Image: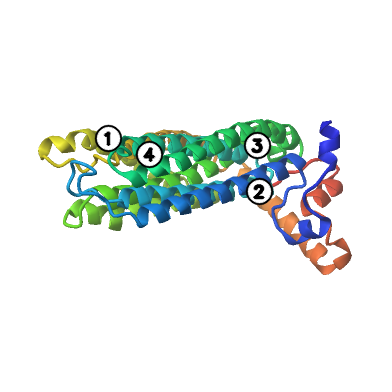
């Protein structure tokens, strides 16, 4: 049955030539098709929810907090859309490069999205008795949970099939140097972690600056002017240090990540002590969301620190040279293919495999 399914295809040869990243793997095509279908469904549901919330005039009795508005609901619904699009992008990229590790990361990200939908549902359910618009939205939010649950289970099953299909092709190097393969595996894990870091760091900072901190607070402008751009710069510095194998840059990144871990511990403490200082609790309608993002960010920072250190120890042991050599050969093959229209259907990686008579890395 699987052989019959693998013989099917959603794309024509012409489409494969024109669209970069369309996987030849049947299971990869199914994964992408389901990811696109999921994000379209999420977009439709979230746009309906945002429209309903934006058109609602909140009742002053909705909550005991005088500062309460629909702004937090709108922000979290918009963030949901961004997260769904981000998932589709990393899934597409994983298929384009036959990167098994990123496929696993994409599947885990979708599970995180499912957990986020649960938080949204129960957070809105607690307010539904005091606001009719929120109550009406619960049915759609429940549908979203069911859709994400089904998709997450499907992605888990597809990830296994893709793993069997792709295997560890991305890590197979010239010859049988197992140590070099392990270095490249750690290299790819760190790249994937950094991509996730960028999303979760920015998402948390935007929530904090928009919903919790006030315009008159110095901390607000530090968050917007220093923490958000600083986090992005540090993560791009990590990408640069990893690509160029610059040891002191990687050590600097690790030092900043340790400081970032301390920062999230501070924010966690503030989250549960801020309301003791005054009668107004700035976290009252966002505590659950922020707690979720703090936990995810702390887990990501710890994982990133571990792999930064492992990759730092792998610097100057031949990995960069091997990647550069492969990229050079692949670029030459691409030039030859570009010069001959009759070779348009040939994949550069496949061509290299034939030329060398063995499997090669499927490098970015």
Q: For the residue labelled by badge 3, is the local secondary structure a helix, a strand or a loop?
A: helix
Compared with 92, 3 (above or below) is above
Mark closer to the chain start, 4 or 1: 1
Q: Position of residue 201 (x, y in %)?
A: 39, 46
Q: Are marks 3 and 4 in contact (CB under 8 Å)?
A: no
Left of 341 or right of it: where is 313? left
Q: Are marks 2 and 4 in contact (CB under 8 Å)?
A: no
Q: Give the numbered dot on residue 293.
A: 4
Q: For the residue labelled by badge 4, is the local secondary structure a helix, a strand or a loop?
A: helix
The local crowd at label 1, few if under 14, some if 14 to 19, many if 20 or more residues have their Cα within 10 Å, is: some
Q: Give the numbered dot on residue 268.
A: 1
Q: Which residue is mark 2?
A: 323
Task: State whether residue 266 appears in this view.
Answer: yes
Q: Position of residue 24 (x, y in %)?
A: 77, 47
Q: Nearer the viewer, mark 2 or mark 4?
A: 4
Left of 183 or right of it: where is 83? left
Query: Which residue reaches farthest right?
Result: 342
Mark closer to the chain start, 3 or 4: 3
| Viewer-closest of 338 and 284 | 284
Q: Position of residue 308 (x, y in %)?
A: 47, 39
Q: Residue at x 30, y 39 (%)?
A: 127
Measure the C-alpha gap from mark 2 to mark 1.
41 Å
Compared with 352, 299 (above or below) is above
Q: Give the numbered dot on residue 180.
A: 3
Measure the C-alpha gap from mark 4 to mark 1.
10 Å
Mark closer to the chain start, 2 or 4: 4
């Amino acid at each position: 049955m699987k052989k019959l399914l693998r013989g099917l295809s959603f794309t024509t040869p012409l489409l494969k030539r024109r669209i970069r990243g369309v996987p030849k793997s049947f299971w990869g095509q199914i994964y992408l098709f389901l990811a696109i279908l999921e994000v379209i469904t999420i977009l439709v549901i979230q746009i309906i929810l945002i429209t309903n919330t934006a058109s609602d005039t909140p009742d002053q009795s909705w909550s005991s907090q005088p500062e309460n508005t629909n702004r937090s609901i709108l922000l979290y619904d918009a963030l949901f859309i961004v997260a769904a699009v981000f998932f589709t992008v990393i899934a597409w990229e994983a298929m384009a490069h036959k990167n098994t590790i990123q496929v696993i990361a994409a599947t885990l990200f979708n599970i995180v999205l499912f957990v986020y939908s649960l938080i949204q549902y129960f957070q809105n359910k607690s307010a539904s008795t005091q606001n009719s618009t929120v109550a009406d939205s619960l049915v759609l939010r429940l549908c979203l949970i069911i859709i994400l649950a089904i998709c997450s289970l499907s992605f888990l099953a597809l990830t296994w099939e893709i793993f069997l299909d792709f295997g560890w092709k991305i890590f197979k190097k010239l010859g049988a140097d197992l140590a070099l393969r392990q270095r490249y595996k750690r290299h790819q894990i760190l790249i994937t972690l950094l991509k996730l870091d960028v999303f979760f760091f920015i998402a948390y900072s935007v929530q904090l600056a928009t919903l919790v901190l006030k315009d008159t607070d110095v901390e607000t402008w530090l968050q917007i002017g220093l923490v958000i751009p600083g986090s992005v710069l540090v993560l791009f510095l990590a990408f640069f240090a990893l690509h160029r194998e610059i040891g002191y840059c990687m050590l600097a990144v690790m030092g900043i990540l340790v400081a970032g871990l301390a920062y999230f511990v501070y924010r966690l403490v503030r989250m549960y002590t801020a309301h003791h200082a005054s009668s107004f609790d700035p976290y009252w309608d966002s505590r659950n969301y922020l707690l979720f993002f703090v936990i995810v960010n702390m887990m990501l920072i710890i994982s990133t620190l571990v792999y930064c250190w492992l990759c730092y120890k792998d610097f100057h042991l031949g990995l960069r040279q091997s990647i550069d050599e492969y990229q050079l050969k692949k670029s030459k093959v691409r030039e030859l293919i570009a010069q001959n229209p009759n070779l348009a259907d040939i994949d550069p990686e496949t061509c290299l495999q034939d030329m060398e008579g063995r499997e090669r890395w499927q490098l970015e």
